[in-house]
């Protein structure tokens, strides 16, 4: 299937709402966040380490996409499309999550599978809330960056923010 065909297939089924924040956690199927809605951060000298970036995701899974494994992936890219290192790679990390050197993690993600409870009606959807903390990300330079959220290998949401030199 072509990339656009895959995009149509995923896009027709699942969708993602997302937000940037200072911190987020999931509890009992709900997201709890602090400092929601920023689009600019600053640093004085580069490279700069940012303490924490919180990412809240709500994945909408329709009736027809339940009882199936779905992959979710998140990465940060700069305005030239280069992936930002999210941290040091740990032994045994999936090579698809690493940069070309194999030393840095540039993508986080995993699999999810939403069941189909008996009360779920055809046409209904379920929400999968995910809280992701990206701690200590080192940004090499100021500029425009984007958090890319992919489901089943297709980008379904992009959040941009600017890192300003202060």
Image (cartoon, rainbow, N blue to C red):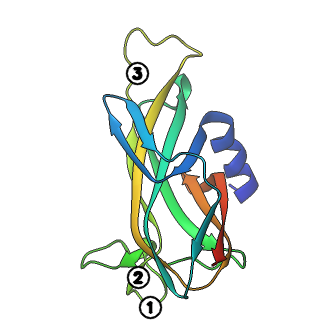
Tag 3 secondary structure: loop
Location of residue 73 with respect to 103 vertically, above or below: above
Tag 2 secondary structure: strand
Q: Please state which of residues 97 and 17 is positioned toward the viewer in this rendering.
A: 17
The residue carrying mark 1 is 101
How far apart are labels 3 and 2 at the CA level? 37 Å
Tags 1 and 2 touching, CB below 8 Å: yes
**Badge number at residue 104:** 2
Mark 1 crowdedness (10 Å alpha carbons): few <14, some 14-19, many ≥20: few
The residue carrying mark 3 is 116
**Is residue 2 something that shows in the picture?**
no
Query: Residue lying farthest bottom?
Result: 101
How far apart are labels 1 and 2 at the CA level? 7 Å
Q: Is residue 148 left or right of residue 117?
A: right
**Residue 98 image offset from top left, x and y in percent:** 43, 78
Residue under the image location 51 percent in, 37 percent down: 58
Q: Is residue 159 left or right of residue 135?
A: right
Residue under the image location 60 percent in, 16 percent down: 123
**Residue 153 image offset from top left, x and y in percent:** 57, 57
Q: Nearer the N terminus, badge 3 or badge 1?
A: 1
Location of residue 22 with respect to 49 vertically, above or below: above
Location of residue 106 with respect to 10 vertically, above or below: below
**Residue 21 image offset from top left, x and y in percent:** 51, 51
**Residue 80 image offset from top left, x and y in percent:** 72, 79
Q: Please state which of residues 23 and 87 is positioned toward the viewer in this rendering.
A: 23
């Amino acid at each position: 299937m072509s990339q656009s065909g895959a995009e149509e297939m995923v896009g027709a089924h699942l969708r993602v709402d997302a937000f940037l924040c200072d911190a987020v956690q999931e509890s009992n199927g709900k997201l709890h966040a602090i400092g929601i809605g920023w689009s600019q951060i600053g640093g004085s000298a580069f490279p700069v380490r940012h303490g924490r970036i919180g990412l809240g995701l709500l994945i909408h899974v329709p009736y027809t996409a339940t009882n199936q494994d779905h992959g979710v992936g998140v990465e940060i890219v700069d305005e030239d499309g280069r992936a930002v290192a999210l941290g040091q790679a740990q032994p045994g990390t999936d090579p698809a999550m690493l940069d070309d050197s194999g030393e840095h993690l540039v993508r986080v993600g995993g699999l999810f599978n939403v069941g189909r409870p008996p009360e779920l009606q055809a046409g209904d959807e379920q929400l999968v809330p995910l809280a992701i903390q990206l701690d200590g990300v080192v940004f090499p330079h100021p500029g425009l960056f984007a958090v890319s959220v992919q489901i089943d290998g297709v980008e379904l949401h992009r959040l941009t923010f600017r890192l300003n030199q202060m």
